């Protein structure tokens, strides 16, 4: 059973405005608990209990969180800025920084500002020789990265397509074998000036190494101030 997760949580959260001036956005309170608390709780319910938290911005606040909740969660803090510097940016960087802590095991990857159900986490955490990404059918796929697929196999990832190619969008919930690390080492800087994890995923998909699982329960992206109320109401209903 997969036991490790890499949680990317080094960013500033600029869209959260005044709510994140003194803390990473992952620690903004929802119903009197940091948002990250719910993320880790659902991971633990899915059976994944070794949390590798990749931090950077306001890392001292993340350290305080880890200390406060050490009896509930097994958290290892990884300082992205210390390992990769502050100039390298992109979704591939936190995964690369976690390599020594993952070892030779399969592992799940999420971004710390996304909330998934234990069921959907379990669905993507398949313990086999393949890598997995999770998709969600969306009415406006042009705003996201979308998956091209052949049955359950991922064929390509198209970022914000101007013309319709697929309505299955990338939700950022993934499972990797250690082969992802070598794929990341071959990733160059994208036109946006970033090191994109999707470029590494695309390379593995070309070899038939990536499968897709669809989100069946729920997915929340905690990116804007309005999301605090939205997620609060959802949690209260549950």
Image: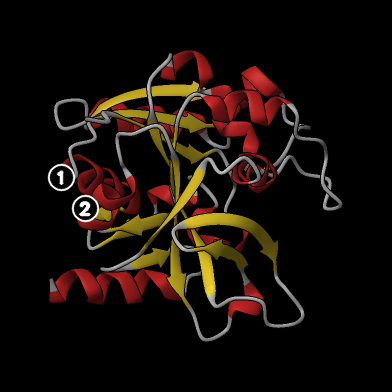
Seen in the picture, residue 111 relative to 168 is either above or below; the reply is above
**Residue 59 appears anywhere in the view:** yes
**Residue 111 appears anywhere in the view:** no
Question: For residue 77, what is the image quadrant?
Answer: top left
Question: For residue 158, what is the image quadrant?
Answer: bottom right
Judge from the rendering whether residue 49 lies leftward or rightward of residue 9; answer left or right: left
- Residue appearing at x 30%, y 68% in the figure: 218
Residue 52 rendering spot, x and y as whole percentages: 39, 27
User: What's the CA distance linking mark 1 and mark 2?
Assistant: 6 Å
- From the image, tell me which residue sits under label 2: 118
The furthest residue to the right = 191
Residue 212 rendering spot, x and y as whole percentages: 44, 56
- Residue appearing at x 50%, y 39% in the figure: 8
Q: Check the picture and name the quadrant holding the C terminus.
A: bottom left
The furthest residue to the bottom = 139
Seen in the picture, residue 104 relative to 77 is either above or below; the reply is above
Task: Find numbered disc 1 in the image and state the secondary structure of the residue it sits on.
Answer: helix
- The mark nearer the N terminus, 1 or 2, is 1
- From the image, tell me which residue sits under label 1: 45
Count of marks, rendered view: 2
Q: Are marks 1 and 2 in contact (CB under 8 Å)?
A: yes
């Amino acid at each position: 059973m997969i036991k490790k997760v890499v949680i990317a949580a080094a960013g500033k959260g600029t869209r959260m405005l005044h709510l994140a001036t003194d803390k990473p956005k992952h620690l903004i309170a929802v119903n009197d608990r940091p948002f990250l608390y719910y993320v880790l709780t659902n991971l633990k319910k899915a059976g994944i209990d070794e949390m590798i938290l990749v931090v950077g911005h306001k890392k001292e606040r993340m350290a305080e969180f880890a200390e406060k909740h050490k009896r509930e969660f097994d958290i290892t803090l990884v300082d992205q800025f210390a390992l990769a510097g502050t100039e390298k940016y992109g979704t591939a960087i936190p995964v690369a920084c976690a390599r020594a802590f993952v070892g030779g095991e399969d592992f799940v990857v999420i971004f710390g500002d996304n909330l998934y159900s234990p069921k959907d986490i379990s669905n993507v955490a398949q313990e086999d020789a393949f890598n997995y990404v999770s998709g969600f059918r969306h009415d406006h796929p042009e705003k996201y990265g979308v998956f091209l697929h052949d049955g359950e196999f991922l064929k390509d990832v198209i970022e914000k397509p101007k013309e319709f190619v697929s309505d299955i969008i990338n939700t950022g919930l993934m499972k990797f074998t250690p082969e992802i690390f070598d794929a990341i080492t071959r990733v160059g800087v994208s036109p946006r000036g970033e090191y994109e994890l999707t470029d590494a995923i695309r390379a593995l998909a070309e070899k038939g190494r990536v499968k897709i699982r669809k989100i069946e329960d729920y997915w929340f992206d905690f990116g804007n101030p309005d999301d605090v109320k939205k997620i609060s109401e959802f949690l209260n209903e549950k």
